Amino acid sequence: MFSLVSPQAEHLIVFDLEWNQSSYTPNHRMPHEIIEIGACRVNRDYQVTGTFSAVIRPRVYKKLDKHIRSVTGITEEELAQGRPFSDVFGEFIQWCGEDAQLCTWGRDDFPVLRRNAAFFMTPMPFEPPIDAQLVFAHACLHSAHQQMNLHNALETMQITVDVPAHRAVYDAQCTAALLASIDGAVRAMDDAQRAQLERTLLREKRIAASSLRSMPTRYVYQSDALADTRLMAVECPACGRRMAFDTPWFDGGREKYLALARCPQHGIAYCQMHFKRIPAGTLIMHQRVYAADEEQIADVREGYRLYQLIPPRKRHHRLSMEEQVKKAGTVQE
Ligand SMILES: [Zn+2]
């Protein structure tokens, strides 16, 4: 029987993060710096049996973003009294205990946690969490794509949680308060719906374990960036080794570049890339690489086959691949 708490785990750690950033001078190795970790431990009956809350003194973004200040109520004075990331994260790992199973609301927290741990060179012992927001959407809203915020989800389920503000530990408590209802709704799903949900959760876990790379380039044109083989290289998300391309980078439509790369040990990875222009006029490259499944491998290879059928002069980079194939007229099979 599907359950939010795996059979091996004694409890679930529901966690939430608050982070700070700078829109003007971002550090591309760590675009978001965690300033607070909040969590609660829930048992198999979804009762809260303990909480964790700690403020982190920022090292990179010391000035608090206005929006974050107003949403969380955190002050710069409070941050100055916080402790370094590696101390707080080490304590959090201890508090979680061995083989902790994590749970979050939404898919954003875990990649931020991974990037902060990598930036501060702290060990990262956790597997990707269960995304309660995703399970909620499937089981309670019957809509795989809806991303409802925590407040609305509580309202939908008519659950009241008496917490003072939007701080990490309170958001973790709100998520925990929803778990029993979510689990109940999952149990009410039929086998086909549950199988679909489990497939989606597996894919999300692979995406959550992505390696992310953001890098400012000296290029103004995408074609120049694409010709730079060092910039275009990809590393295995599991072992960090440079991978050989199975399918080279190509424009998969609307200037979202796709590729497949192979690690001898970890198999084929799905690679996504896009560029953003900074005010100075040059491009920043954003890459995401994660373990591919059979369906994605087939999709990318088919996309590349279609891409090659469109003569270079007829390629419209702002269109999707389907629109390009249509526009190019009958293509030579
Ligand atoms: Zn590898």
Image: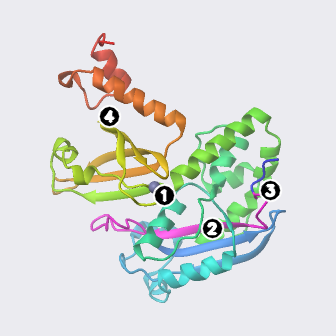
Q: Name the N-terminal-most of marks 3 and 1.
A: 3
Cα separation, mark 1 vs mark 2, equals 24 Å
Amino acid type indicated by mark 4: Arg
Residue sitting at 31 percent across and 10 percent down? 330
Q: Is residue 25 magenta?
A: yes
Rendered position, 131 above or below 124:
above
Q: Please tell me whether mark 4 or mark 3 is closer to you in this view.
A: 4
Q: Name the N-terminal-most of marks 4 and 3.
A: 3
Q: How many numbered discs?
A: 4
Task: Check disc 4 and report the residue beneath it.
Answer: 254
| Segment colored magenta | 5-33
Task: Check disc 1 and report the residue beneath it.
Answer: 238
Image side of residue 121 versus residue 257, left or right: right
Rendered position, 200 above or below 131:
above
Amino acid type indicated by mark 3: Ala
Q: Estimate how packed mark 2 is, as few (under 14), some (14 to 19) or many (20 or more) residues with alpha carbons within 10 Å.
A: many
What kind of element bears circle 3?
helix
Residue sitting at 57 percent across and 74 percent down? 37
- The location of residue 276, given as percent across then percent down, is 27, 50
Amino acid type indicated by mark 1: Ala
Q: Please tell me whether mark 1 or mark 4 is closer to you in this view.
A: 1
Amino acid type indicated by mark 2: Phe
Rendered position, 188 above or below 328:
below
Cα separation, mark 3 vs mark 1, equals 34 Å
